[in-house]
Image (cartoon, rainbow, N blue to C red):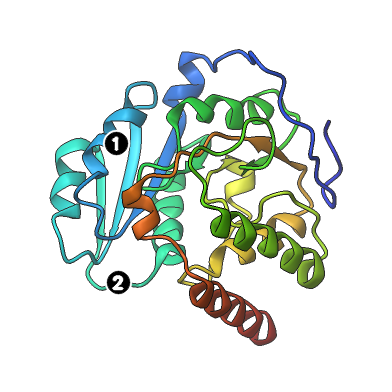
Amino acid sequence: MIRSANTTTSQPTPAGAPLVDDAVRDGTFIVIAAYNEGQVLADVIRGVSERFPNVVVVDDGSSDDTYTAARSAAPYALRHMINRGQGAALQTGITFALHHGAQYIVTFDADGQHQPSSIDALLAPLVAGEAEITLGSRFLGEDAVNMPRMRSWLLRGGVLFTRVFSGVALTDTHNGFRAFSRRGAEKINITLDRMAHASEIIDQVHHSGLPYREVPVQIHYTEWSMHKGQSTRGAARIAFEYLLGKIMR
């Protein structure tokens, strides 16, 4: 099930994997990048913090009450004064978590799609020393809940794009649900501020020299999250930004 640093696995984590212990939970920081998520953010934070107390929310220059919600519900609330993009917000949160002694870091979406119950499965291979980075997949294990057909096609197109331009064979390439050991997180330096950061992270993981794997995670699509989701035009823009960034590096 575990591959070398330059390959990945598509085998799911066995059902009924044990939950991580208190020491791991206390050393884990959940990083949430949020932009205009005030309507749902507090509930998302509460769902995560029931088991993982170290939640870092980075408000990426929202125009609504996202920062207020973050300050009321999360122990760590950071703020970009202007909207820079999800990639920049995640890097801010990862850097903050490392500076505060995080042993494990999980990136978690603010819109309610990600399920806290999947966090333990992402952490388990890291805790066991089987991998330094785990990448969540919507296409392993159970199907994502309420995934629209068009979204499925876009995501599978992203998988093909990644195989062609990065040479990495994954089942899900634009899933923001990931986990890093401290060593793994120290290898990540996001320079693409907006959504193309997801492809950049995969490149950095692939070239990090560290073992990594995919893990099945549960995603629930809601009316709110779909309203903020990527369109076909948006996907094309992401691909362009990624390729431009790849040329510039």
Q: Mark 2 highlights which residue?
A: 83
Neighbourhood count class around disc 1 (C-alpha, 10 Å): few under 14, some 14–19, many 20 upward? many
Residue found at x 71% / y 59%: 159
Amino acid, disc 1: Ile
The x and y percentages for residue 16 are 63, 13
Position of 204 compared to 2: left or right?
left
The image shows residue 59, relative to residue 246, as above or below, that is above
Q: How many marks?
A: 2
Residue found at x 66% / y 31%: 126
Position of 29 compared to 208: left or right?
left
- State the CA–CA distance, disc 1 to disc 2: 21 Å
Label located before the other in sequence (1 or 2): 1
Amino acid, disc 2: Asn
Q: Can the viewer see residue 212 in this picture?
A: yes
* Quarter occupied by residue 15: top right
Q: Mark 1 highlights which residue?
A: 45
Q: Residue 155, labelled with which disc?
A: none
Residue found at x 20% / y 36%: 73
Q: Quadrant of the N terminus?
A: top right
The x and y percentages for residue 232 are 53, 72
Q: Quadrant of the C terminus?
A: bottom right
Q: Can the viewer see residue 201 in this picture?
A: no
The x and y percentages for residue 155 are 62, 58
Residue closest to the far front: 149
Position of 9 compared to 205: left or right?
right
Element under label 2?
loop
* Quarter occupied by residue 197: bottom right
Query: Viewer-proximal residue, 222 or 235?
Result: 222
